[in-house]
Image: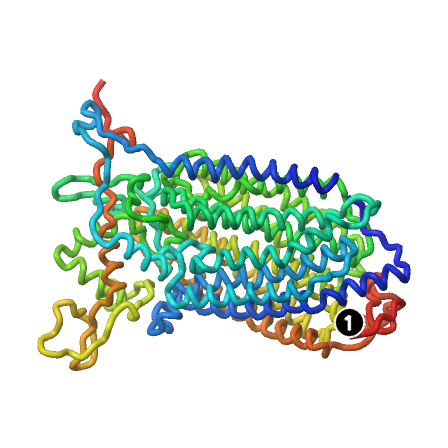
């Protein structure tokens, strides 16, 4: 697992720009449609948290009732945005790491459309009252084979190209291990959960257990590895430095592979499943602290060796924010899942939602934003239009996420304490309402920033970005002698390769 | 490390956990052996089989489709995992006129007739393991009507004016009264000449909710807090 090398010869630069160009439309398709789903998801999140404090809101419309909107909110966040952002990053990064141009952009794009059609029908299914009632798997039953098949078609090329990469390239970069692992884990996890729950009727309580395991695995065996894979790449690439510790990178990866698959069943503590399962799940979730913190610290130490590159780079700022989110996620997982102490307060409170949002938004999404700011100028050969839009996006996303996650996590603990206090009468929703108001407000802030992100991204896809060799950075001066993105930043028309810009 | 070694290592680390916490428990629990009462310990014979009546399969479907599990749980945890048992009417009834304290923990046989146990995500509302028992004991013969009104708009019920349970008027039909009002009509405010009657989904859901009575006596082997015996 050697550092990224920077022997940028003309042919290397040319090859990179050819790879970028071959993936322009698939990458931009996944990012843009993902961003659109993200906006939809957050809008649904605003509605659902608002309904938690004002239940009568919009209640005449069955499509907007709380139970359906909240389910649609999470499913669009996971499959509409999360998975599609991951697709964009995986196909691009794997092509770069395998040094191969994409020769099947058309097939990937077609499968991408099928994926989006599946999500659209699935969401309409949930909102029209045909959901399955299984958390994170609420899409009607027809959706999962469609999604799984399009998943294979989208990513098979990346996998095959990597296995056939040129020999003698030295050791594989850590990002590739993370992405390959995520590409293998997801179908295994998704297939297991869907086959068991839809095709092999089992005991209803263990079915709920498999569902809880599925959700945990989606977070720790898909979103975490994809996010860390991207973060390692960006940290090394933008700073131009070697990864801080190759050994820590290995420890981080293999501890995730060893511990991750055991987590999840703690959600069923006290339910009639075999007694060891919740304890195994709780232990694993607490131990996942190790891979989370190892990966995050390794990337952060790489990024922070170069403070001058850090402050103007939107990529590094988003990635750093996401990595801090990962450290918090690791700590939260350890602190909120202790049987006999904290688990009973968090098991059935807002904390669960807060944990999911922290993982999918506070870590994964922020890193994906960082990756987007790095990848898009390269595949479109245009620079981002507006520094102000990027800065607004950053501030609103990060502060909004902090609010949603902290309020849900800690509000959830207090809510849980209220629930467990059996000497007082049950006050139900009043335990949650004040936190819901804050979350509505924070989601609205995040929505505001992401609508602009979507517009910015669409303009970039239409190739209306700024022409020029100077990347859009967050400081106001343009005096840097060279691009802090390294030689690779020089992708535009006048670059050494001078490939035609269309 | 070659790609092949990598994939094998990944499959082993994942596969062991996959078998241990997912596949084996799932298939073991598929064929759960029934638990019998024993004459010596329980003073009864036969097999423990909590019988449920009502439109359980249909109602559970409506329950899932409308996301009830997002705010309500269906599990009464043993005391090592939470304080659910100490609430007067969650695990059963603290003072049932005929049977005394009927409270008990949820067990694996309680989900008879369902395909997916709605253990639940959050407790914005109370646990529903014994909602049928609870409402029937409080409302008597009006239990069904009370649940319909609660689903239509919980805030219509005087002592529930602060309820955060989302109203679900779309499960009901508003129709012009022809002849005499329907027996099923809800006692809620509606414009003159009209009445609100439950639709088929609302009926299935209420039937399901009334079937939630998980407080039958269990065999001693399933009892978390068996009565102390002398000696």
Residue A444 horizontal side relative to residue B154, left or right: right
Residue pictured at 90% horizontal, 62% vertical: A10
Tell me residue A440's x, y (percent). Answer: 47, 67
- Name the one closer to the observer, A339 or A9: A9
The residue singled out by tag 1 in the image is A381
Q: Is residue B39 above or below residue A177?
A: above
Residue found at the far top of this picture: B231
Q: Is residue A439 visible?
A: yes
Tell me residue A229's x, y (percent). Answer: 69, 52
Residue B123 horizontal side relative to residue A164, left or right: left
- Quarter location, residue A83: bottom right
Q: Is residue A203 above or below residue A398?
A: above
Residue found at the far left of this picture: B180
- Quarter location, residue B190: bottom left
- Quarter location, residue B31: top left
Residue pictured at 69% horizontal, 74% vertical: A461
Tell me residue A363's x, y (percent). Answer: 61, 56
Q: Quadrant of the C terminus of chain A?
A: bottom right
Dot 1: chain letter: A
């Amino acid at each position: 697992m050697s550092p990224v090398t920077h022997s940028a010869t003309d042919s290397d630069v040319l090859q990179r720009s050819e790879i970028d160009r071959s993936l322009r439309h698939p990458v931009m398709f996944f990012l843009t449609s993902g961003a659109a789903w993200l906006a939809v998801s957050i809008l649904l999140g605003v509605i659902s948290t608002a309904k938690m404090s004002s239940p009568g809101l919009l209640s005449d419309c069955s499509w907007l009732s709380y139970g359906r909107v909240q389910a649609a909110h999470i499913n669009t966040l996971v499959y509409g945005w999360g998975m599609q952002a991951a697709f964009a990053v995986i196909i691009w990064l794997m092509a770069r790491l395998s040094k191969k141009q994409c020769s099947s952009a058309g097939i990937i794009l077609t499968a991408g459309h099928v994926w989006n059609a599946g999500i659209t029908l699935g969401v309409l299914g949930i909102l029209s009252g045909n959901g399955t009632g299984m958390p994170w798997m609420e899409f009607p039953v027809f959706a999962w084979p469609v999604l799984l098949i399009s998943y294979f078609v989208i990513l098979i090329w990346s996998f095959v190209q990597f296995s056939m990469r040129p020999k003698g390239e030295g050791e594989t970069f850590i990002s590739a291990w993370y992405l390959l692992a995520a590409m293998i884990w997801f179908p295994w996890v998704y297939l297991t959960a869907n086959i068991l729950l839809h095709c092999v009727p089992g005991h209803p309580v263990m079915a709920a257990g498999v569902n809880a395991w599925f959700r945990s695995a989606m977070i720790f065996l898909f979103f975490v590895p994809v996010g860390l894979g991207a973060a390692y790449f960006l940290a090394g690439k933008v700073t131009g430095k070697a990864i801080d510790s190759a050994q820590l990178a290995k420890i981080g990866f293999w501890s995730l592979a060893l511990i991750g698959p055991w987590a999840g069943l703690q959600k069923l503590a006290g339910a009639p499943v075999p007694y060891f399962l919740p304890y195994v799940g709780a232990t694993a979730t607490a131990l996942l602290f190790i891979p989370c913190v190892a990966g995050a610290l390794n990337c952060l130490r790489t990024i922070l060796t170069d403070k001058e590159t850090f402050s103007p780079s939107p990529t590094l700022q988003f990635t750093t924010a996401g990595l801090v989110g990962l450290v918090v996620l690791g700590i939260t997982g350890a602190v909120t899942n202790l049987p006999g102490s904290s688990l009973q307060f968090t098991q059935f409170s807002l904390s669960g939602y807060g944990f999911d949002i922290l993982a999918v938004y506070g870590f994964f999404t922020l890193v994906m934003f960082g990756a987007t700011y790095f990848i898009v100028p390269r595949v479109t050969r245009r620079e981002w239009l507006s520094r102000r839009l990027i800065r607004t996006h950053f501030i609103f996303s990060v502060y909004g996420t902090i609010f949603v996650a902290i309020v849900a996590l800690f509000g959830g603990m207090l809510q849980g304490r209220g629930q467990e206090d059996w000497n007082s009468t049950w006050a139900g929703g009043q335990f949650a309402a004040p936190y819901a108001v804050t979350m509505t407000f924070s989601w609205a802030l995040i929505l505001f920033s992401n609508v602009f992100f979507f517009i910015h991204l669409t303009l970039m896809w239409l190739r209306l970005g700024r022409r020029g060799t100077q990347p859009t950075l967050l400081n106001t001066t343009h005096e840097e002698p060279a691009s802090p993105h390294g030689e690779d930043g020089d992708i535009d028309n006048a670059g050494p390769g001078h490939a035609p810009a269309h | 490390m070659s790609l092949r070694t990598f994939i094998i290592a990944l499959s082993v680390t994942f596969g062991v956990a996959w078998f241990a916490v997912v596949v084996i428990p799932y298939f073991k629990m598929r064929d759960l052996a029934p638990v019998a009462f024993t004459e010596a310990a329980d003073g009864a014979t036969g097999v423990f089989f909590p019988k449920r009546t009502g439109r359980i399969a249909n109602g559970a479907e409506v329950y899932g489709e409308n996301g009830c599990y997002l705010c309500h749980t269906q599990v009464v945890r043993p005391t090592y995992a939470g304080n659910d048992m100490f609430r007067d009417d969650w695990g059963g009834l603290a003072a049932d006129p005929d049977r005394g304290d009927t409270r008990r923990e949820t067990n694996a046989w309680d989900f008879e007739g369902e395909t997916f146990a709605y253990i639940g995500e959050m407790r914005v509302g109370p646990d529903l393991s014994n909602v049928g028992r609870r409402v029937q004991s409080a409302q008597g013969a009006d239990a069904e009507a009370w649940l319909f009104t609660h689903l239509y708009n919980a805030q219509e019920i005087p002592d529930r004016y602060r309820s955060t349970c989302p109203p679900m008027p779309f499960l009901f039909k508003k129709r012009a009264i022809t002849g005499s009002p329907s027996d099923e009509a809800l006692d809620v405010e509606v414009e003159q000449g009209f009445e609100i009657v439950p639709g088929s989904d609302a009926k299935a859901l209420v039937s399901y909710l009334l079937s939630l009575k998980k407080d039958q006596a269990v065999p001693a082997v399933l009892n978390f807090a068996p009565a102390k015996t002398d000696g």
